[in-house]
Amino acid sequence: MAFIVLVAALLALFVHLITKKHRFYSIYNLPPGDLGIPVIGQTFSLLHSLRRNTDDQWFRTRIKKYGLVSKMSVLGSPTVLLAGPAANHFIFTNDSLALTQTRALRSLLGRSILTMNGDDLKQMRSALQGYLRPEMVRRYVGKMDEEVRRQIKLNWVVCETVSVLPMARRLTLAVICSVVFGQEAGTIIEALAADFQLLGDAILSFPVNIPFTRFGRGMRSSAKIRKAIKRIAQEKDELVLQERHDVASFPDFITYMLILRSQGAHSLTLEDIVDNVMGIIIGAHGTTSTLITFMIRHLTNEPDVLAKITEEQDEIADNKGTGDVLTLEDVSRMKYTWKAAMETLRIVPPVFGSFRTAAKDIKYQGYDIPKGWKVFAAQSITHLDSRFFNDPTKFDPTRFDNRSSIPPYSFLPFGGGPRMCPGTEFARVETMVAMHYLVTQFRWKLCFKEETYKKDPKLTPVFGLPVELEWRRPPSAADAWNALYIHSG
Ligand code: HEM
Ligand SMILES: *[C@@H]1O[C@H](CO)[C@@H](O)[C@H](O)[C@H]1NC(C)=O
Ligand SMILES: *[C@@H]1O[C@H](CO)[C@@H](O)[C@H](O)[C@H]1NC(C)=O
């Protein structure tokens, strides 16, 4: 009993202190909405709706109650929820709003592009954009093609049922690692695939470093990955300094960053490069694998869309000799397939929203947003609004036939403004190459008609989307043999 009274008294004191802090805000004209229970606010309610994949209703209920600008409190910070295209424009372009990362992410990834600012950020962004620009991706399509085919042979050809999500993850991890590490990619994936998974899983976790928690495991994996990448970077740095790296071929990303550094093009340290490599691998593979997984998922309900994609892909395949790799020209012919991918990104955006922090007191639509407050916009708010997308739950790739019929800042799967995703072209080409080989070779049926989904924080089918595979075109004898050989040897 005494214990309960003590707890109640402490709680009352706590509430008093917090509300005192909130009274301080009365000099501001704050947006409507309540901040909920001190510190915790709406955190659990929002996380719960994410886990149940009902966050879209959660946001809509708040918007209905409070309007397009409202305040709430999540993950320990007062946060202004903004809704609509004008709000998206504000969030992505206003220079008084800084990209925000969770404390967990800062601890896990160190000083990467996601957490840098000022001059370092400028240098890193421009180097990365240079590496991922379309002319560079063009030189890389053949390598992507090779990697995708190898993954399909290893993990899809030999099985009657395949869990799509883990296999798509393995595929996208292999592709990004081959770009980042070059020759060493195979060994890295072998040694660290499980650690990349644990690191990715920890990003939205509670940042207290205790063993056996999600975050604790993530930190252990992070240290292991950092050490392995650092060793590789040091070896590559030796080659660059002795000018023994191979400039004629396409440089891996680490070598590219080290060459730029040796030329004085940037002043980032080797440690900075290592942390950025980790950030890029995490940013690149979870997102693209979510896209591939949900494209496959949606196509099981859309026989007409699948037929049109198949027609487009068969025509491309028929114009190539066996063994010829896809080129960027082939990828640019996959127009309808890309529209189906964009439709998937509209309904299931892999990045569900964006957080920013007010760098100073700012005003938005007459309301004050105090310095240090967070600002948040969810992509689904406009992606699933019938004013911008007629019949928004319908899967219809032809919406993208006329891009100018889509209002600006209502479709933002890759974000916008100066922090827009630099990997957009890379993700497009990778997804198209993967879909080419999957659609031309296989047909698939869901093993569970009623599989449920959670956001964790990316949308995830709880069983990983197992499907039964059927050959559309039987494998060549050589492929079947290779697959068997790889698996038994
Ligand atoms: C379908 C795939 C992808 C989606 C949907 C996606 C989405 C996004 C979004 C929405 C942002 C901006 C977040 C914000 O402004 O709050 C972002 C940033 C970023 N993305 Fe992607 N991305 C994808 C693939 C990739 C790939 C393949 C790479 C690398 C090769 C990549 C690297 C990055 C990096 C480094 C950033 C941070 C940029 C910065 O902070 O300035 N992404 N991505
Ligand atoms: C950012 O927002 C502030 C406050 O609303 C406004 O005064 C400023 O002009 C905006 N800046 C840009 C670049 O839009
Ligand atoms: C595309 O959409 C815009 C805006 O709705 C419209 O003005 C234009 O006529 C459309 N173009 C075509 C070719 O349908």
Image (tube, rainbow, N blue to C red):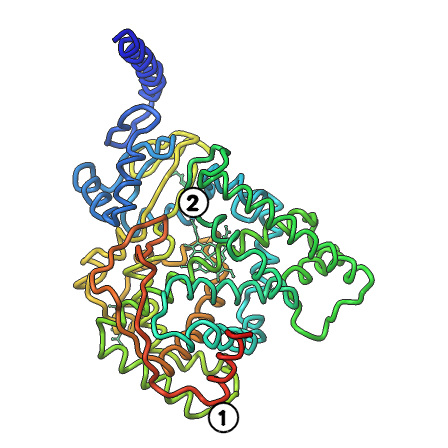
Q: Is residue 86 left or right of residue 188?
A: left
> Which is nearer the eye, 418 or 192?
192
Q: Earlier in the sequence, mark 2 or mark 1?
A: 2
Identify the disc placed on residue 94: 2
Identify the disc placed on residue 321: 1
Cβ atoms under marks 2 and 1 closer than 8 Å: no
Image vertical order of residue 206 relative to residue 51, above or below? above
How crowded pointer 2 is (Cα within 10 Å; few <14, some 14-19, many 20+) is rated as few
Secondary structure under badge 1?
loop
Report x, y in % for residue 38.
32, 23
Secondary structure under badge 2?
loop
Image vertical order of residue 48 relative to residue 416, above or below? above
Image vertical order of residue 88 relative to residue 370, above or below? below
Q: Is residue 233 left or right of residue 244?
A: left
Picture quadrant where residue 334 is located:
bottom left
Report x, y in % for residue 148.
49, 74
- Cβ of mark 2 under 8 A from ligand 2: yes
Picture quadrant where residue 446 is located:
bottom left
Image vertical order of residue 86 relative to residue 341, above or below? above
Report x, y in % for residue 135.
56, 72
Given this view, does label 2 or label 1 mark the residue nearer the observer?
1
